[in-house]
Amino acid sequence: MAEETQKEENIAEVETETVETEAVEEVKEPLEEKGIIEANLKGDLPDIKAGDMVKVHQKIKEVKDGKTKERIQIFEGQVLARKHGKGVSATITVRKVIDGIGVEKIFPIHSPSIEKIEIERSGKTRRSKLYYLRTAKGRKAKLKTKEKKEIAE
């Protein structure tokens, strides 16, 4: 009798495992389609690196008296980090100081709410993440500008 109940439990476990794997396979199929991902990637983005001074043009929707109004807001600051590669989920962390208070925003660079990103100047860095700039003051908080090499013809 104990053997019968143990066999029934084993059969029930096997059935639940097969149902779970089928559900996981169904979820993976739409995510693997490259057409959806490539359609959401922006092709006109500059090569953004940590240390760059950038202007991020972001679309803002305002609702007043039932009317929606769209405008573009510019956030200018220094890129502290770039995360999540170059795919759809890629983000940049931009920091600027306003009246002595540091403000950081994380922008998904392929988001439809981002109109464009302009690089003002590039900073010379030896690190990929510049989180030390949060606590740095004075001269230590400034980066040297990177000199652009011109190709002689």
Image (tube, helix red, strand yellow):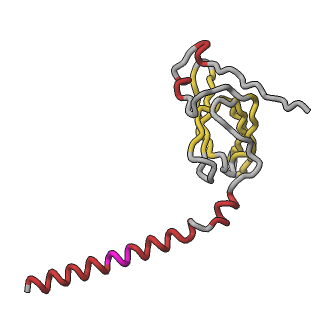
With 3 as the anchor, is 9 left or right in this view? right
Query: Residues in magenta?
Result: 16-20
Is residue 18 located in the magenta-colored stretch of the structure? yes
Image quarter hosting the C terminus: top right
Residue 7, x across and y down, in percent: 18, 83
With 41 as the anchor, is 7 left or right in this view? left
Residue at the (85%, 32%) spot, across then down: 151
Residue at the (51%, 68%) spot, across then down: 28
With 122 as the anchor, is 98 left or right in this view? left
Residue 73, x across and y down, in percent: 72, 38
Q: Quadrant of residue 143?
A: top right
From this view, report whether residue 27 is shown above or below residue 12.
Answer: above
With 59 as the anchor, is 80 left or right in this view? left
Residue at the (56%, 65%) spot, across then down: 31
Q: Quadrant of residue 106?
A: top right
Residue 37, x across and y down, in percent: 64, 61
Of residues 56 and 79, the one nearer the viewer is 79
